[in-house]
Image (cartoon, rainbow, N blue to C red):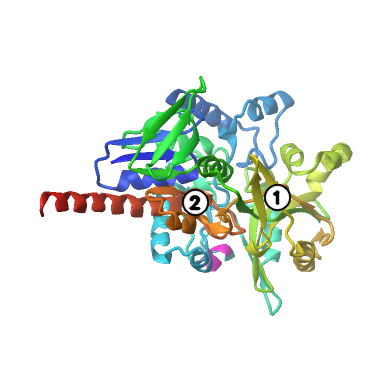
Amino acid sequence: MKICVIGKGASAMGVLSAIEDIDIKFEKIDLISPENLSSNDVNLNQKKENQFFKNKKYFSLLPKKVNIKSNIDEKNLLYNDNNTYLSLWGLSSLPLSSKELIENKINIQQMHEAYERVSKIIGISGNKNDEIEKYLSNSYINEAKVDIDSRIGKIIDSLNVSNNKIKIISGTPRLALKNLNNLKNSVCKCVINNCNIHNPFTNIEVDQFILNLKIKINFIKNKVLKIDFINKKVTLVNKENKKINNNYDIIFVCSGIKNNCLILNNSLELNSLSYKDNASFIFPIVFFKKYNSKVSTNFSLTNGISYLKINNKTHFIQYYALNDYYFSTMIPYFILFFLKPFIKLLKKYLIIGVLYLDNEFSENVYLKKNKFIKTKNNTNYRKEVENSLFQIKKLLKKKFLVFNNFFLKQKSSHHLGGIKINNTNLDDYFKKNKFQNVFFCGSSSFQKNSSSSPTMSIIAYSRLIALEKIKKLYHDKISLNNLKSGF
């Protein structure tokens, strides 16, 4: 059996983990990506990452979003030249609820088995006693002692309420971890930079995971131009712009949702192609005094998460303490220009919240002439945002200040689900046209998008798809061979 995996992100990780666990001898496994995947690159970046986390000057696990103390030269070294190995990966690693799984027509029991397997591939931090865990019932966390910045802790404590109007559940995020085998007899402080037990799972560990697989993988560094869905043929373009055609028995497309749309469009010459994008909004939370605490200055977790259930809708919220990088990436330049003289002061008294609205408020993104165009949602999201922030404002009023009518819309958000071809779901379109053994994994495979962080679900569902489809194809081939031989 010849297998092709296109892409090398979270969904590819799920597919490859399934291939490794299946007791079948494969003729060929090709991993195709335009990005590098070499042991030299991984080892070099791993050294840089380890050096970064061992440096005592850095006061948070989340280097791009919180409390980094460094000079300008060090910042340039860390953030320039596409050094994405410093990005935390899969924050926050949360499963979908049973309701969301049903909406996506995913078998709940099978998905939970996939979640559990994923939690052994990447460890997941957390606190079994916080309200998020009680709400989710089982998010497959590996119990760990979590120190929280005092400001974030006060927000979490204040935002756990249930009444006739709203229900809000708050707690700590779930970080992806590595080196879990070392945790058995140790108390792990997984949210700190200088943990001597293990490190957080960052982007570079995805490459490391692929390189450490026991199965033999052929890495092909080329761009995928199109796919022949009938003959299962992949057309690649190399550096010399020469086209190469490879045939397979089964193909898993695991690249990002935008790249998947481009591949579909090139392959099928479509009239209409779209996907869903969550509507998300940034809002400030001001506190009246600087909380002095050893926790807030010594390697503490400086973000939190909440689920807000209101009017039969479920929104997702994240809270971040600020640093210079977060200001520059999240706040529009024209506003940042006026805030620059006050950034040092703002970091002491300001926390940024990000509100991800329920799936009902998702926006359609259309691909037209190889350009992505977002259409405005007719639903009045402004009223929903104001109402949600008003509820948060009431709960935080004694300690924090929230403006329910002051927020900024983000340009893009969680891409999870909703790819449609001529207004038909991707899976239904493939069945209608009898395209067999070509499967789009990752965010593209979900029919409805969730407001909460999708990474863990992407790995788990990609794994589930690969297990089911490879086993079915294998047994179909055996049955066909037996039929031909007269058995």
Is the C terminus in the top left, top right, bottom left or bottom right quadrant? bottom left
Q: Quadrant of residue 305?
A: bottom right
Report, in whole angstroms, how far the alpha carbon at label 2 lies from the one at label 1: 23 Å
Q: Position of residue 228 (x, y in %)?
A: 43, 41
Horizontal arrangement in the rendering, residue 186 relative to residue 50 (left or right)? left
Q: Residue furthest left?
A: 486
- Looking at the picture, how far across and down is residue 178, in whole percent? 46, 42
Camera-near label (2 vs 1) is: 1
Q: Quadrant of residue 379?
A: bottom right
Which secondary structure, mark 1?
Answer: strand
Front one among 214 and 52: 214
Residue kind at label 2, given as amino acid type: Ile
In the image, residue 329 above or below residue 117: above
For the magenta stretch, what is the residue range?
A: 132-136
The residue carrying pointer 1 sits among few (fewer than 14), some (14 to 19) or many (20 or more) residues within 10 Å by Cα, namely some
Residue 458, numbered label:
2
Residue 400 vertical position relative to residue 439 in the rendered view, above or below? below
Label 2: element kind: helix
Q: Residue at x 52, y 51 (%)?
A: 444
Compared across the picture, whether 184 is left or right of 283 comes to left
Identify the residue under disc 1: 374
Is 198 situated left or right of 312 in this image? left
Front-lying residue, 9 or 55: 9
Q: Is residue 485 visible?
A: yes
